[in-house]
Amino acid sequence: MTFTHAARRLALLLPLAAASPATAQEAGGDPIAGEALWPRCAACHALDEARNGAGPHLVGLVGRPIGGADGFAYTPALAESDLVWNEETLAAYLLAPRDILPGTRKAGVLTDPQDIADVVAFLAERTTE
């Protein structure tokens, strides 16, 4: 990834993160509500085992480099990213995946900010190593 690409992606991410509370908990993210929403994500992602599906597995997601799940065929947008998954990057990506990482195949499945905060709270609780 060139410096220009990294700077552009960061420039897109920062306003979204700045507009959001610092953590899913501060946003009122409820991990129990996020777990109830998880089946929508489980269609493509595994949570409890390092098995890739249509999307990469999410074992150890929080703190992992974007594009860092072994064995998954990432698009160049994710494979070349120098960002790391944390609550802010997750929230921004779930809200507008193709704005944050142009070229990603991920569609925006969640559109409600509260649902996103809930899923991020759930993932932060379940995937932080």
Image: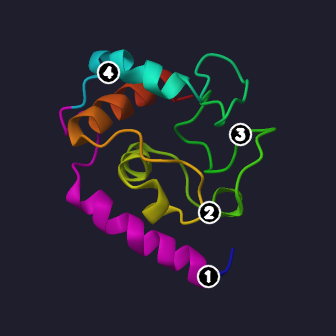
Residue 99 to residue 55: above or below: below
> Identity of the amino acid at label 1?
Phe
What span is colored magenta in the figure? Answer: 4-28
Q: CA distance from mark 2 to mark 1?
A: 10 Å
Which residue is tagged 3? 69
Which residue is tagged 2? 82
Q: Is residue 16 magenta?
A: yes
Which mark is first along the chain, 4 or 3? 4
> Identity of the amino acid at label 2?
Asp
Q: Residues within 10 Å of mark 4 (few under 14, many from 20)?
A: many
Q: Nearer the viewer, residue 66 or 73?
A: 73
Q: Is there CB contact under 8 Å for labels 3 and 4?
A: no
Q: Residues within 10 Å of mark 1 (few under 14, many from 20)?
A: few
In screen coordinates, is 98 left or right of 91?
right
Q: Is there CB contact under 8 Å for labels 3 and 1?
A: no
- Residue 59 position, x and y percent, is 62, 27
In screen coordinates, is 95 left or right of 30?
right
Which residue is tagged 1? 3
